[in-house]
């Protein structure tokens, strides 16, 4: 493959070289031959006499060789070629010459042949890399055009960006493959992709991708869309997360809530998916600010949709009791677990749930107490967290806790769901370690509950 790319690129270089043409001489003076296993260069020159014209044609041939090899070939080889009609270092030889009268004196043509193997070996490493890079960019752009014809516009964009990334990696031999040219092409493709958002049904949001240019505005097939939303981390902090959606043959897809830690009410931002690693690679190679116009356009093309998740456990028909226990099994007066549990749910937008400090040593005791305080509820949720172990060492104390989350029906004594989780906390003394462990247990329990809401 590398040799094919080199050969194709060399052909482009040779085609771009200008020589005189002969109207009466041999065919090779008008069209460069391509014998198998050889690279051929036809030099031409004009002089007052044949000797002067011959020297000019030899220099012209070596200029073409240098353009193809990527370095000056005249200085090291001109005198040898003029004297011996060959170049030992390249295994090259002048195989044919032709001279004819010209208005300025004499026109001279010389055909120089170089074995292909030796020629490829002689290409400078930097120039060889440039030739290969140019060929790879051309291949990527060809694939991009195929994808565009298939209405796979987001794949088209990604391929052009891969070409841009490659063009920033070193020299290219085609002026249409410069980073500036490819950035402009990428922005044209990005700007032609439209995202349409339908009405949200809870957290299910329909989408459609279509091309904004052309007579028919075709649907974008297999289009990749990034759906970004806000979620609550394990520590109760808000952070951004995303999923990638793919459109079908009609250019349609939908976003559906699958992450239980997604906040209950908010906005989902939809944008054409551009791989993060590709963006990072381009930005790292490009001059500062070079890629900003593309990123600004990507932001401009982003659309938003509001959502609000309904609770399967209605806030008005459920109540939660939290009870905390020490290593001795006795109920604690502190509310570390309850406070962390409440804060986590609030951060997730699970509002309206009544959370109280439960009372009782056993689960049945806490359930009985909760029902007496809040009769007639459809669901009773119990969170019981206690310290199960503690260790000290190296000036630090660690406490291990276990939390049990249970959901009971309004009139039943058997839970419809029971989940447990373990947590560890550290501190400078046992009291601080206990508090940290119960806080972590409360956050973990809140995450478990979110998956049921």
Image (tube, rainbow, N blue to C red):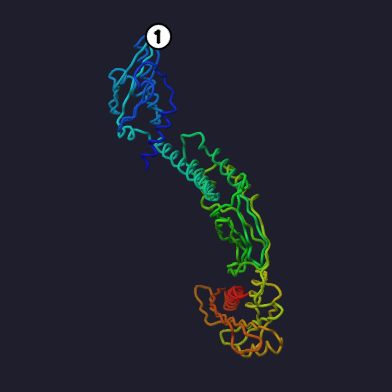
Q: Give residue 71's quadrant in the image.
A: top left
Image side of residue 267 versus residue 401, left or right? right
Number of marks: 1
Q: Is residue 308 visible?
A: yes
| Quadrant of the image containing the N terminus | top left
Above/below status of 424 relative to 141 = below
Image side of residue 405 versus residue 54, left or right? right
Q: Give residue 337's quadrant in the image.
A: bottom right
Q: Position of residue 127 (x, y in %)?
A: 41, 35
Above/below status of 424 relative to 369 = above
Residue at the (55%, 38%) spot, across then down = 181
Helix, strand, or loop for circle 1?
A: strand
Q: Is residue 432 visible?
A: no
Q: Position of residue 198 (x, y in %)?
A: 66, 59
Residue nearest the viewer, comparing 370 with 424: 370
Above/below status of 388 relative to 229 = below
| Quadrant of the image containing the C terminus | bottom right
Q: Residues within 10 Å of mark 1 (few under 14, many from 20)?
A: some
Residue at the (71%, 75%) spot, across then down = 352
Residue nearest the viewer, comparing 182 with 170: 182
Q: Position of residue 120 (x, y in %)?
A: 34, 35
Q: Give residue 119's quadrant in the image.
A: top left
Dot 1 corresponds to which residue?
105
Above/below status of 9 relative to 304 = above
Residue at the (38%, 24%) spot, across then down = 31
Q: Position of residue 386 (x, y in %)?
A: 58, 82
């Amino acid at each position: 493959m590398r040799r094919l790319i080199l050969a194709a690129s060399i052909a482009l270089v040779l085609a771009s070289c200008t020589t005189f043409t002969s109207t009466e001489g041999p065919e090779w003076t008008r069209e460069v031959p391509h014998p198998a296993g050889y690279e051929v260069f036809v030099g031409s020159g004009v002089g007052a006499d044949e000797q002067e014209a011959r020297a000019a044609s030899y220099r012209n041939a070596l200029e073409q060789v240098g353009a193809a090899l990527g370095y000056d070939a005249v200085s090291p080889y001109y005198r040898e070629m003029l004297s011996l009609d060959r170049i030992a270092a390249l295994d090259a030889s002048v195989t044919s010459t032709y001279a004819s009268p010209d208005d300025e004196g004499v026109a001279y043509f010389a055909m120089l042949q170089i074995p292909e193997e030796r020629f490829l070996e002689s290409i400078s490493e930097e120039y060889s890399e440039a030739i290969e890079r140019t060929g790879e960019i051309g291949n990527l752009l060809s694939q991009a055009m195929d994808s565009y014809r298939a209405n796979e516009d987001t794949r088209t964009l990604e391929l052009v960006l891969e070409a841009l990334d490659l063009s920033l990696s070193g020299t290219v031999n085609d002026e249409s493959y410069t980073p500036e040219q490819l950035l402009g092409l990428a922005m044209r493709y990005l700007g032609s992709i439209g995202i349409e958002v339908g009405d949200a049904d809870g957290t299910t949001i329909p989408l459609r991708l279509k091309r904004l240019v052309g007579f028919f505005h075709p649907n974008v097939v297999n289009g990749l869309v990034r759906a970004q939303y806000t979620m609550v981390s394990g520590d109760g902090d808000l952070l951004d997360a995303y999923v990638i959606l793919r459109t079908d043959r009609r250019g349609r897809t939908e976003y559906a809530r699958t992450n239980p830690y997604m906040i209950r009410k908010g906005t989902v931002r939809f944008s054409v998916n551009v791989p993060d690693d590709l963006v990072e690679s381009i930005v790292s190679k490009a001059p500062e600010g070079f890629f900003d116009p593309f990123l600004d356009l990507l932001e401009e093309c982003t659309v938003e949709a509001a959502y609000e998740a309904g609770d399967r456990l209605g806030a008005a028909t459920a109540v939660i009791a939290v009870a905390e226990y020490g290593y001795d099994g006795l109920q604690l007066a502190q509310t570390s677990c309850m406070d962390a549990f409440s804060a986590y749910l609030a951060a997730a937008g699970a509002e309206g749930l009544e959370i109280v400090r439960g009372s009782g040593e056993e689960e049945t005791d806490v359930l009985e107490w909760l029902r007496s305080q809040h009769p007639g509820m459809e669901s009773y949720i119990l969170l019981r967290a206690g310290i199960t172990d503690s260790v000290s060492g190296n000036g630090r104390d660690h406490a291990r806790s276990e939390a049990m989350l249970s959901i009971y029906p309004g009139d039943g004594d058997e839970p419809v769901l029971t989940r447990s989780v373990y947590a560890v906390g550290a501190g400078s003394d046992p009291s601080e370690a206990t508090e940290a462990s119960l806080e972590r247990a409360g956050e973990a329990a809140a995450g478990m509950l979110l998956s049921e809401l």
